[in-house]
């Protein structure tokens, strides 16, 4: 398939039917599908393992579940929709009064046609989810309930795809993989992560990129408990969720609020015209709750389109592959690729000729610069090559495109005028004073001073 | 009396007739009245005592003062209004020409019916203050003047009410007590301070609260000169003035501009809808001039309703008990109590389970949290329990009410998940990025992810 | 001449005819003219000298240059306008076809009546600049070209006027002096610099003031290469350019963006009503490119009226003495003098009576203060005399005029209440909270509290 949107949507459709949970076959099959597209290492964490403040629960197995009328006719059947069964429901078999049954039913009075997604991982319970309209139609006095599930010692599974880089430091991309038949939340992000990994695997990489596919909360906690060293190497990271709905991209900042990753995503989203869709950090949402807990405080934000909880299809049977648009998936991948490029290209450089301006003409650097912007980028990159300013600082302070600045710096490195510095990005106080317009007029000015005019 | 406004107004009416000054019987009687309502320690500083850059002046005694026509009829009499006599007037007796008398009269041409309040503490002089209309009516060639006052060695008096607390650190509440028959400036604040002391004396207190009733400028200087140790213990403080007029509350920042007290009052006033009534520090006004002198630089701002000098009744015979409203006094006390609660409850905490989220459900903390806001408050309090963020930081960054955050933190302390940290409040850079609305949507989102829906 | 504008304009007219370049007689004669008005030390840097990343080029001598028709009639002649000859043109003599000639002509199709200013300092070439209209009129097949110039070993000249000061630290004022017959760029600034030097030479000076007249880029680089010690002593500096056109003053910040010089010029321009004409630093423009290279990073901005490149006359034969207005030159000198006064008067002071307010009345300081503003200035100057706040901080935080604050501080120094502190200016975080209006109301308030009212 050549259309990236169609290819991403095919992942969503293929994974939709599986009944995922925080453990079990559905999760394992999902990792198996991913492993057929990118190299994946799967880790199994045995039930009962203590992880940080938590304990890995027993593994959940589902063989079937239904509610039958006393005449044997089927009212609710897990085979019709994975959401019908309370996720992590304990097994149960028997005849119950409608009143007793009601205590085990979940529905949405405000959305009477939709089946809700409800879980009970840590409180042993059995139950069904159904459309409120169907619930109200339950008129019999007694029903037969059969929940053929198992909660037994087993393990929790998560998968990692690690693409080694040339420098120290890792980038972590995490997508929770525990939600059953829900397309936007979060098959959309699993799909985007798969194809981003494929794209990056074909590129020369500065950083090591680690893609984590784990069940929400407990899965992230398992990974953190077992990977404190890797966590300490993380330079930038993103939690991916809800990347397939029609809304424009949005971003929730890391706990640090101004980590480099926050500046990268903000730069791209502003450039895309969606600066107003940058949200402050909150300790709610997805696995940023774990990665941004005060002990780890990792520089990780959350990239989304519609934030979880903000769209009516959220956590219901309406979150189908049809709700997820190929074009939206492709756009998410494109935006993510722009962010990845910033992560890979940004850096801090130091001039080897910091006293006065080096003579660029003698080195043919002006001739090599076709446009006024590219000549300006040379001067800006040299002037701020002081071991303190990142290329993003240069771009923001100059009002030039990041790529223009990064290309100019590459030419200056090739000419031996600047060298890659070390250290992490220091936010540039001056950038707030930046003034694209005046920079451009300066560009024109500069051009006129140094370039013979037309006809020459 | 049960109505707090009436009770406060009763203090104002009771104190109004006394002829206060920076020394003398009127001041002493005022402290005596206060001592009948709250425990008060009175200090006498002898005349001639060197205090910082100043010297305590002789004590002023007034027995009477009048201007008589040559036929013996009374024109001006101190017994009619304490403002008629130039405050700190030297004694004088004799017959004077109208021209000589004019040199000793003070009036307000722009407010011809009002008697002005004028003092001459440090320049020996005699004089009268009167309505400009009455002044213009003086038609005789000569008058008899009799000022039966005394300026003799004595002492300056100030009073302190100290309510000990459980922790190190003091809170200083100061109200100048030298103005004669002026109700808003400053009997209103004396009244509010008396009742705040009564309220706090009945509570368990974290900090030691010290209430200072001293004459303006020289009294504050006397206290500072004698209490450098206590001054060094001051963590927060407020100068109280003009708390009885009908205007909404206002606040003048401390010299530091962003001391915790500034953030506390700003938080309360913004919440009350009066954020625009927060004024920058100026080295003018009341005793904040002394407390915020560069050598002491105490974290003390000034709480007011109408700032001194901004209302026409200011420093005139129109500043009567009628100008002061019971409802305004009661509102000032309520606002001050809100500020006191922030001072007492704010703190910095550290999580004992900072790696990943602790499992709240297992500890019954979710069941204990009735509302989405209280659940959110648990997550925010845990996430920012890093020994750097104060509870006010948490409230401002989360957009939650301070009380919600403080209550959640108390529950987390009880559950052994966080402990009170040390250190003072570090302003939270992130707070400027705080975004109540998005926090709330996150709250809804959070609720939907973790709580079984209706009917379950 | 008494009119400063006319005097400045006379400098421009006198210097206009000279054919300046980065070396040679025109530059030397320009320095000779300056030396007849202010003490000037001229330095000659031999051709071939390595300076930073550059090498001093051969010296350029022009005896004449013309394009003749084959019948001997003159088409273009250097004697008619110095701009006709490509600046730094190599010698050439011979008969050329129109096609060959075209390759050596420079004109402005968009401004067909103007002769452009074009240089070729570092690429050996010969050429002429002419009005595009005249260029299009060239109809013959062949022409005679005679360029009687010389590029031979010699030297580059620059001049310095140094006015010693009482304290450590220098102020550098730099005006490029290499442009030929161009009045605004940059004879206007040479003229203003001459007269500022004359004014300052007649004053008692705190800092050493150094005026540098050097060719652009290579001249500044020569000076920097030879004066690293002097460069290290520079506390403040300004590059002057285009100070004669009718536009209001404008300023380009130093690379540091918030150096004291940036705050001084911003303060003056805002006060003049031109705050919007303050531009961010860019590594383009004039010799700020060298002074603000990352290795030197000197606190130097660029003072202008119309920024170079922003007006149609820029770098053309339309930049004549008529384009430069006496009134604009005089206004530039006045604004520069205001900035010089801030530089000379600003400082940091420390109170010798920092605990409480010193008693000003006893010292007659209130009597010495005629206005409410001058009394306020005493209180503000004392309150912020903490060794951290500069007088500019005090002025900005109080909303008072800088002169008011500086005068008050002088009176406090005379009274022995404050002493000049050391250290450089610390930007005052509080100043952003400053609030002139409320300060003024505080002033009124203060006045009412301490001054007996009318008739007294």
Image (cartoon, coloured by chain):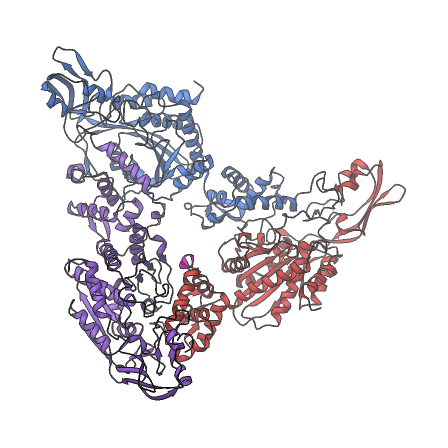
Chain colours: A blue, B purple, C red
C412 magenta-colored: no
For the view shown, which residue lies furthest in the bottom direction?
B94
Q: Nearer the viewer, residue B287 or B21?
A: B21
Residue shown at the point (57%, 59%) measured from the top left: C238
Could you say where residue A430 lies in the image, as x and y percent from the top left?
47, 50
- Tell me: C316 left or right of A96: right
Q: Magenta residues: mostly which secondary structure? A: loop
Task: State the residue in front, B271 or C349.
Answer: B271
Identify which residue, B433 or A329, lies in the foreground: B433
Residue at horizontal 29 percent and vertical 39 percent from the top? B440
Residue C47 x/y as whole percent: 69, 55
- Per the image, is C422 magenta? yes
The magenta segment is: C421-434
Q: Splitting the image into 4 quarters, where does residue A251 fall? A: top left
Q: Is residue B132 above or below residue A199?
A: below
In the displayed orientation, state which residue is furthest to the right.
C71
Quarter of the image with the C terminus of chain B is: top left
Left or right side of A454 for A114: left
Whether residue B390 is visible here, answered yes or no, is: no
User: Does residue C250 appear anywhere in the picture?
Assistant: yes
Q: Residue A27 placed where, x, y %? A: 26, 24
Among the 4 quarters of the image, the one containing residue A68: top left
Q: Quadrant of the N terminus of chain B?
A: bottom left
Q: Quick check: C167 above or below B244? A: below
């Amino acid at each position: 398939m050549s259309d990236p949107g169609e290819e991403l949507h095919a992942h969503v459709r293929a994974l939709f039917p599986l009944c995922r949970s925080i453990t079990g076959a559905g999760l394992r099959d999902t990792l198996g599908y991913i492993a057929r597209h990118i190299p994946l290492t799967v880790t199994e964490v045995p039930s009962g393992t203590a992880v940080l403040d938590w304990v890995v629960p027993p593994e959940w197995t589902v063989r079937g579940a239904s509610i039958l009328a006393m005449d044997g006719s089927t009212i609710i059947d897990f085979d019709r929709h994975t959401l019908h069964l309370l996720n992590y429901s304990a097994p149960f078999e028997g005849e119950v009064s409608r009143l007793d049954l009601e205590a085990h039913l979940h529905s949405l009075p405000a959305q009477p046609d939709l089946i809700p997604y409800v879980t009970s991982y840590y409180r042993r319970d059995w139950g069904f989810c159904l459309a409120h309209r169907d619930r109200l139609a339950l008129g019999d006095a007694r029903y037969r309930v059969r929940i053929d599930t198992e909660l037994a010692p087993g393990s929790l599974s998560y998968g990692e795809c690690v693409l080694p880089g040339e420098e120290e430091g890792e980038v972590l991309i995490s997508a929770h993989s525990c939600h059953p038949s829900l397309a936007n939340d979060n098959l959309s992000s699993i799909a985007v992560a798969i194809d981003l990994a494929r794209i990056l695997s074909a590129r020369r990489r500065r950083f090591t990129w680690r893609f984590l596919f784990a069940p929400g909360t407990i899965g992230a906690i398992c990974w953190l408990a077992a990977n404190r060293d890797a966590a300490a190497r993380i330079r930038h990271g993103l939690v991916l969720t809800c990347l397939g709905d029609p809304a424009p991209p949005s971003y929730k900042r890391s706990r640090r609020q101004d980590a480099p990753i926050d500046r990268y995503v903000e730069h791209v989203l502003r450039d895309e015209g969606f600066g107003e869709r940058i949200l402050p950090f909150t300790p709610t949402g997805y696995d940023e709750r774990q990665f941004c807990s005060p002990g780890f405080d990792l520089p990780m934000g959350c990239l989304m389109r519609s934030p979880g909880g903000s769209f009516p299809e959220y956590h219901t049977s309406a979150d189908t592959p049809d709700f997820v648009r190929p074009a939206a998936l492709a756009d998410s991948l494109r935006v993510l690729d722009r962010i990845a490029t910033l992560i890979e290209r940004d850096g801090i450089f130091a001039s080897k000729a910091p006293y006065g301006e080096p003579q660029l003409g003698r080195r043919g650097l002006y001739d090599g610069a076709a446009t006024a912007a590219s000549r300006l980028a040379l001067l800006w990159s040299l002037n701020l090559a002081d071991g303190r300013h990142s290329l993003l600082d240069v771009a923001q302070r100059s009002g030039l495109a990041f790529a223009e600045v990064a290309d100019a710096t590459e030419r200056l490195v090739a000419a031996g005028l600047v060298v890659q510095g070390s250290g992490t990005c220091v936010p540039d106080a001056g950038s707030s004073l930046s003034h694209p317009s005046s920079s451009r007029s300066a560009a024109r000015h500069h051009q006129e001073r140094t370039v013979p005019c037309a006809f020459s």
